[in-house]
Every structure is written in structure tokens, then in C-alpha cells.
Image (tube, rainbow, N blue to C red):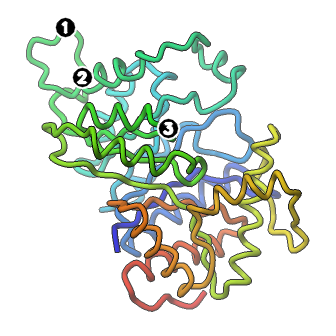
């Protein structure tokens, strides 16, 4: 089985708050390290009532300080929201504090709506060339400092792994052209997964950073002791996804035994389910094997939007166990 990592949005569960969400975040990271997960990434989102990971670099530092060996990083930093120099300084500082453990994933979405973009001092004018240029500028700040008029301190001379994130062919092309690893957001936008993976692999140019393509794919992981229990836990993810699509984001909903769908919503969820591993340990193992065989993924990064913290922990524990082919501990 390929390596398994975690993408955490620090979900704020219905009836809870951000303080508890961040406490749960560190608890999960510490357990993930013991269970053998490769990396623990946090994602930048803004103006989202159900997500507490908006100050992503701060949380990366908090998780890195509370763990010892697991790689910690951004999945990702939304580069249009920030000056490349500032991002280089953030991650140069993190690398100086936690050497050899920091990843920097870069996306080009704003991580929020137009009103949020304005609040972040972003222009709404779209420049399709800006993201690749910003990535190159950011990468230049990690070069040796000799001869640079503007230096990232810390940052210059550091070798921090940079990933390109995306859910379309644009990111696949950027990652391929720059010879960088590519993380595709198949957990929420799987429509172009096959095409993006093909474009990335076919057009990849070897670089000083990477000799051959490396593709990481996002999945939902909702595992429990039985298929029925996992299906009930999944209703929180499903309701949260549909609320977001309706333009009504909120805290992560409680599981709902009476959850039902109308036909347009059923079709929306069917697409997401193509990259969702839901069930008992045996079911999840079969689903993971089939997904890796179908996609050829080099690594998987799992999202578990589960309302109850203990159930969420157990889902990730099962994920670690089935990928290592060892028995899962009882809840």
C-alpha cells in the first residue's frame, strides 16, 4: 500500500467551537505520528464557520512543536492571498525551528468568496499567469542568498519541499513544467482526476527537486467497526458538502439517521463518493486497493470530516492499520 497522510481542516463540529477544534487538531496529529502517517497538512480557508485552520502557518508551528517526527505542512497556502516573500519568510522560519519536517503546498484559489477576497486585500482581476510567476518568485527566495537584492531571512538557502495543489488541469501543467510534486484535490473535485493525472505524468519535466512525477490524491476516509456505522458517520460529511454547495457553509453537522437526498444532490455526492473510502476495516482496505490500482497514486492524503472526535480518531486509526495490514485497536 502507498503511504498515507492526513489533511486536516480543523473542523468545528456542530455544538462545539474553534477552541475545542484546535485542541482536537493537536491530539489527532500526535496520534497520527504514533500510527505512522507520513505527513500532517493543514489547509487555508477563510470566512468558513466550520473550519478553524485559517491561520495555517501558526497552526503548522503549533503541530510541529507538539510532535517529533511527522512531516507537517500546508495543503495548502493560497498563494494569491499573500506576497511570495512573506510566505518564504513564514516557511523559512518554520524550517529553521523544525528542520527537515516542513512541507509547503501552494494553491491558486482564494480559499473563500469574493467578499473574503476583498477583505484579504486581493484584487478580483484574474491574471492566469500570476500563479506560476508567484511560485517562481517564491522558489527564488529559497535559493542561496548571494547576489539577491531581497532576501528571505530565514528562508534563503533552505531546501523546503514545495508542492503544487489543484483540482484542474492548470495545476497539473504548472507542477509538470516546474518538476514539482502534485497534490490533486480529488476528495472534493474528482471530475478531472484522470485527465489531470495523465497531463501531469505526460508533461513532467525532471528538475533539481524531483526526478520523476509524484502524485498525491485526496480521499475521504470514514472508517468504523461496521459498514453501517461508517455510513452513518458519512452523513456528516455529506450534509456539510451539500451545505457548502448551496452557499450555506456552517459547522460540521451531526450524523443523521434520517438523511435523504433529492436526485440532483444524489448525483453531486456520487461524484465525491468515487474518492471516498467508507466502511469497516475490510471494506476500506478493498476500496483503497481498488483506488490505488485505478489511479496509480504515489501517496494518499485522507480527510475525515466526522462529527465526534473519538469516532474521527478511530477512523484514522483504522486507516493506518489497514494500510499497514495490521489489526486495528478496538475503540
Residue that numbered label 1 is attached to? 149
Q: Quadrant of residue 206?
A: top left
How many numbered marks does the figure carry? 3
Q: Residue at x 53, y 65 (%)?
A: 27
Relative horizontal placement of residue 287, taking residue 48 as reference (left or right): left
Pick the front one: 78 or 89: 78
**Residue 148: image location, x then y, percent:** 16, 12
**Contact between labelled residues 3 and 2, with CB atoms less than 8 Å apart:** no
Separation of marks 3 and 1 at Cα, in angstroms: 35 Å
Pick the front one: 142 or 244: 244
Q: Residue at x 57, y 68 (%)?
A: 221
Pick the front one: 222 or 287: 287
Residue that numbered label 2 is attached to? 141
Residue that numbered label 3 is attached to? 168
Q: Which residue is drawn at 60% across and 52% down?
A: 10
* The C terminus sits in image quarter: bottom right
With respect to residue 143, does 228 lie above or below?
below
Q: Residues within 10 Å of mark 2 (few under 14, many from 20)?
A: many
Task: Decide which of tag 3 and tag 1 comes sooner along the chain.
Answer: 1
Q: Which residue is drawn at 44% across and 82% down?
A: 321
Nearer the observer: mark 2 or 3; the answer is 3
**Residue 74: image location, x then y, percent:** 43, 43
Q: In which quarter of the image is residue 297?
A: bottom left
Nearer the observer: mark 3 or 1; the answer is 3
Amino acid at each position: 500500500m502507498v503511504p498515507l497522510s492526513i489533511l486536516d481542516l480543523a473542523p468545528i463540529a456542530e455544538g462545539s467551537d474553534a477552541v475545542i477544534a484546535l485542541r482536537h487538531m493537536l491530539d489527532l496529529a500526535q496520534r497520527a505520528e504514533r500510527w505512522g502517517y507520513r505527513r500532517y497538512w493543514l489547509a487555508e480557508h477563510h470566512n468558513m464557520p466550520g473550519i478553524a485552520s485559517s491561520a495555517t502557518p501558526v497552526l503548522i508551528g503549533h503541530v510541529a512543536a507538539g510532535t517529533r517526527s511527522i512531516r507537517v505542512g500546508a495543503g495548502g497556502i493560497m498563494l494569491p492571498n499573500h506576497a511570495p516573500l512573506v510566505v518564504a519568510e513564514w516557511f523559512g522560519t518554520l524550517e529553521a525551528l523544525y528542520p527537515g519536517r516542513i512541507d509547503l503546498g501552494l494553491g491558486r484559489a482564494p480559499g473563500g468568496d469574493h467578499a473574503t477576497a476583498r477583505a484579504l486585500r486581493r484584487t478580483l482581476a484574474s491574471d492566469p499567469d500570476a500563479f506560476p510567476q508567484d511560485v517562481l518568485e517564491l522558489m527564488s527566495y529559497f535559493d542561496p542568498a548571494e547576489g539577491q537584492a531581497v532576501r528571505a531571512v530565514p528562508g534563503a538557502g533552505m531546501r523546503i519541499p514545495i508542492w503544487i495543489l489543484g483540482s484542474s488541469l492548470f495545476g497539473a501543467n504548472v507542477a509538470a513544467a516546474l518538476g514539482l510534486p502534485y497534490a490533486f484535490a480529488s476528495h472534493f473535485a474528482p471530475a478531472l482526476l484522470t485527465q489531470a493525472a495523465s497531463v501531469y505524468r505526460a508533461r513532467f519535466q525532471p528538475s533539481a527537486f524531483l526526478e520523476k512525477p509524484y502524485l498525491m490524491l485526496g480521499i475521504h476516509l470514514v472508517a468504523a467497526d461496521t459498514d453501517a456505522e461508517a455510513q452513518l458517520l458519512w452523513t456528516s460529511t455529506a450534509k456539510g458538502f451539500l451545505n457548502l454547495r448551496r452557499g450555506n457553509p456552517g459547522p460540521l453537522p451531526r450524523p443523521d439517521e434520517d438523511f435523504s437526498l433529492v436526485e440532483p444532490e444524489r448525483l453531486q455526492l456520487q461524484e465525491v463518493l468515487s474518492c471516498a473510502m467508507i466502511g469497516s476495516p475490510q471494506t476500506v482496505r478493498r476500496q483503497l486497493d481498488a483506488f490505488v490500482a485505478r489511479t496509480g497514486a504515489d501517496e494518499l492524503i485522507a480527510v475525515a470530516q466526522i462529527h465526534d472526535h473519538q469516532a474521527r480518531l478511530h477512523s484514522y486509526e483504522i486507516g493506518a492499520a489497514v494500510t499497514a495490514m495490521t489489526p486495528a485497536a478496538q475503540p
